[in-house]
Image (tube, rainbow, N blue to C red):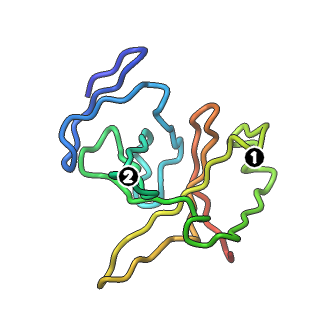
Amino acid sequence: MYSNDKKVIFETSRFGQVEVDSDKVITFPDGIVGFPSIKRYVLLDHNDTVVRWLHAIDDPDVAFIVVEPMVLVPDFKLTLDPTTKRYLKLEDAKDLVILVIIRVENERVIANFHGPLLFNASIMLGVQVVLDKI
């Protein structure tokens, strides 16, 4: 992995060497459930679809297929508690990006609406929240 003020270059097992602007790095200070030590990720487009890859910078094998929940459930709503808003330093709701991890299991697509990924696009700070109910 190589980085300077403008670019981050890292190896991936799926896409080979990837180069992204350093301002595209999303930091999850607490990691993601099951991956607490991996803090830095980038979003990579998947062909020309709404599906994207959330790829770890510091581990070439860790990547999640993600999609905005409204693609799957058009009337999806998420109410953020004040603590999460403070954690994300979210001052403007338009800076909030919500993603859900999807996986394919036995030819079924399963989306994790109970553990959405949230990030503040203005400062690229993220968190995974675990919801009791949706």
| Residue 49 to residue 76: above or below | above
* x and y percentages locating residue 130 in the rendered image: 61, 65
Sequence-first tag of 1 and 2 = 2
| Residue 49 to residue 122: above or below | below
Q: Residue at x 27, y 23 (%)?
A: 2
Q: Residue at x 52, y 43 (%)?
A: 28
* x and y percentages locating residue 44 in the rendered image: 38, 44
User: Which of the labelled discs sits on residue 38, or is there none?
Assistant: none
Of badges 1 and 2, nearer the viewer stands 2
Q: Quadrant of the C terminus?
A: bottom right
Q: Which residue is mark 2?
A: 48
* Amino acid marked by disc 1: Lys
| Residue 115 to residue 96: above or below | below
* Amino acid marked by disc 2: Asp
- Give the left or right position of residue 32, taking residue 76 as reference: left
Pick the front one: 132 or 79: 79
Q: Give the Cα distance between marks 1 and 2.
A: 32 Å
Q: Residue at x 24, y 51 (%)?
A: 61
Q: Which residue is mark 1?
A: 85
Q: Residues within 10 Å of mark 1 (few under 14, many from 20)?
A: some
* x and y percentages locating residue 119 in the rendered image: 60, 45
* x and y percentages locating residue 95 in the rendered image: 69, 40
Q: Residue at x 55, y 59 (%)?
A: 68
Q: Residue furthest top?
A: 5
Q: Quadrant of the N terminus?
A: top left
- Give the left or right position of residue 19, taking residue 113 as reference: left
